[in-house]
Amino acid sequence: MRTAEAVETLIDGLPQPDADRYRDMFARQPPWGFGSRPALLVVDLQRGFVEDGYPLGNPTAAKPCIEANLKLLEVARRTDVPVFFTRAMVWPNAVENGAWLRGAAMEDYGIGEREGELDLAEVLDRRPNEVVIDKPKPSAFYGTQLEAMLTYLSVDTLIVTGAATGRCVRATVDDAFARNYRVILPIEAVMGGPGISHRIELLDMGILIEVVADLMSVDDCLAAMGNTPTGAV
C-alpha cells in the first residue's frame, strides 16, 4: 500500500467537513522525509498490552501492528538502522509511580499474574545490540537516556511505531518533534484506542496545524529505509 492510500483509510468514513479538510491539508503539505540517519523506535509492544488474558491486552489490534513491526525490524536489522524498544513500567512504590497509575490499577498491567508480564512480545525477538528503555512516563524521552543515545549515533530521523497512539506514541512523537527530529509514523505499525480515536490521533499528528510527523505507509517506509544511507552502529 502506498502512503496516499493508507492515509485515505484513516480519513474514509469521517464526517464530510472533517474528511475534506484532512484531504486538502494532506495534499498541500509536502513530507519532510528521511534524513541521513534513521532509527526505529518500537513503543511498548509488551505482553500485557498485546496478548490475551490481560485487562489491557488487545490481540485483535496487536496482530496486524506486530506483523508490520516485524517487517520494519527485518529491514532495520539488515540495513544497520539502530533499533530501540521501550517498556512502560510500574514501579515498586507510589512515589516512583506518581501520576502514572492514576485511574489504572496495578492489575491492569498484569502485575503479579505471571512472570515476565512486562516483557516485550516474544515474537519481536530483540537482539543483544538493541536497547530496551524502561520509561517512567508516557514519553520515551522523559527521564531516560534516549536522546543521549540518539545523539551518540548521530540519528536525525525517528521511525516511531507501537502502542498506544493517543498516549505513549503521541507523547514520544511530540517530544521528538520538540527536539527537531524528523519523525516518521508508519500507519499500519501503530495501534491505538477503540473506534475512530486511533485514526484521529494519527491524522492530528500527521496533518493538522504543526505537523509533528510524516504519515507513511509501511511499504513506503520500508522502501525509504532500504535506500537511506545509514552506516554501521
Image: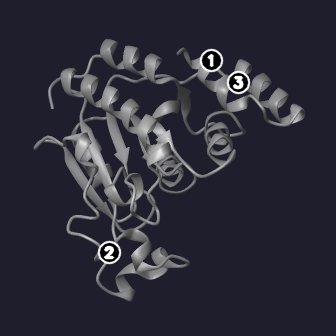
Q: Relative to 82, is 196 on the left or the right?
A: right
Residue 66 visible? The answer is yes
Q: Is residue 156 above or below residue 103?
A: above
Residue matched to label 3: 26
Q: Relative to 19, is 232 on the left or the right?
A: left
Q: Residue 140: x and y, percent? A: 38, 55
Q: Residue 69: x and y, percent? A: 36, 34
What amino acid is found at the position of numbered circle 3 in the picture? Phe
Q: Residue 208: x and y, percent? A: 71, 37
What amino acid is found at the position of numbered circle 2 in the picture? Ile
Q: Residue furthest left?
A: 128
Query: What is the image's colouring?
Result: one colour
The residue drawn where x is 37% and y is 32% is: 67
What amino acid is found at the position of numbered circle 1 in the picture? Glu
- Number of the front mark, 2 or 3: 2
Task: Look at the numbered disc 2 and give the secondary structure of its residue.
Answer: loop
Q: Is residue 206 above or below residue 115?
A: above
